[in-house]
Image (tube, rainbow, N blue to C red):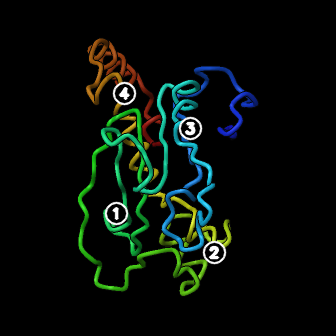
Amino acid sequence: MIRGDASDPEKLPFEYGTFDLVVAHPPCTAWSDMPSANKDGDAPELIDEAREIGRRYGTHYIIENKPTAPLKEHKKTVLEGRMFGLPIRYERAFETSFPVNQPPTIGHLGSKTETSPFFYSERSPEWWAAAKGYPTGKYPKEHMAKNCIPAPFVRHLVRAWLTATDATQGVRDYTNYDAEMDERRSRMENADLADFSNQ
């Protein structure tokens, strides 16, 4: 993994078309619903720059931000915790250069569902690590609650990317199937008894 700052693309330490997948997290302050965010209206808006970086340096890209951010609607998927059975909402939007299935939103899980990371102080670091799907003790509690994208979101997006870039589309290549089976049968028929006892 290589990190780069999209706000200064001339200093990015890699060549055009280097990566299979670029994941961009431009600042969300301009679209944050936190009362203290962007009071002066001068927060950086780097989604266009992130998109350009994704196109320039990757075959595909993912841009993460708030659902209210100006992501391209026809490429936008909004994910939230209840779609994956998590006890948090944590809505995030993702613009992708490949199709992603939009999971359905399910109802509450019966217990208290956190509606915002503003309530991070009510829960332990271990609770937040379990809710977000990351190892305990790796990140501070506030960072885990407010900034870490839930691991199920990431897995959902990566599965969609793998599906979109799988040239076989899930169909096995049977071109050499007969030869492979003949070789396998030959190995089994000529194997020593000791080969079977070690399995």
Please indicate whether residue 43 sits to the left or right of residue 166 in the image: right
For marks 3 and 2, give the CA distance. Answer: 28 Å
Query: What x and y, as percent, mark residue 179?
Result: 31, 12
> Which residue, given by chain and number where applicable, does mark 1 sit on?
84
> Which residue, given by chain and number where applicable, does mark 2 sit on?
141
User: Which of marks 4 and 2 precedes in the sequence?
Assistant: 2
Residue 50, disc: 3
For marks 1 and 4, give the CA distance. Answer: 24 Å
- Which quarter of the image is occupied by the C terminus? top left
User: Which of marks 2 and 1 precedes in the sequence?
Assistant: 1
User: Which of marks 1 and 3 precedes in the sequence?
Assistant: 3
Mark 1, secondary structure of its residue: helix
Three-letter amino acid code at the position of disc 4: Asp
> Which residue, given by chain and number where applicable, does mark 4 sit on?
166
Q: Say whether marks 3 and 2 touch (CB < 8 Å).
A: no
User: Which of marks 3 and 4 precedes in the sequence?
Assistant: 3
- Which quarter of the image is occupied by the N terminus? top right
For marks 1 and 2, give the CA distance. Answer: 21 Å
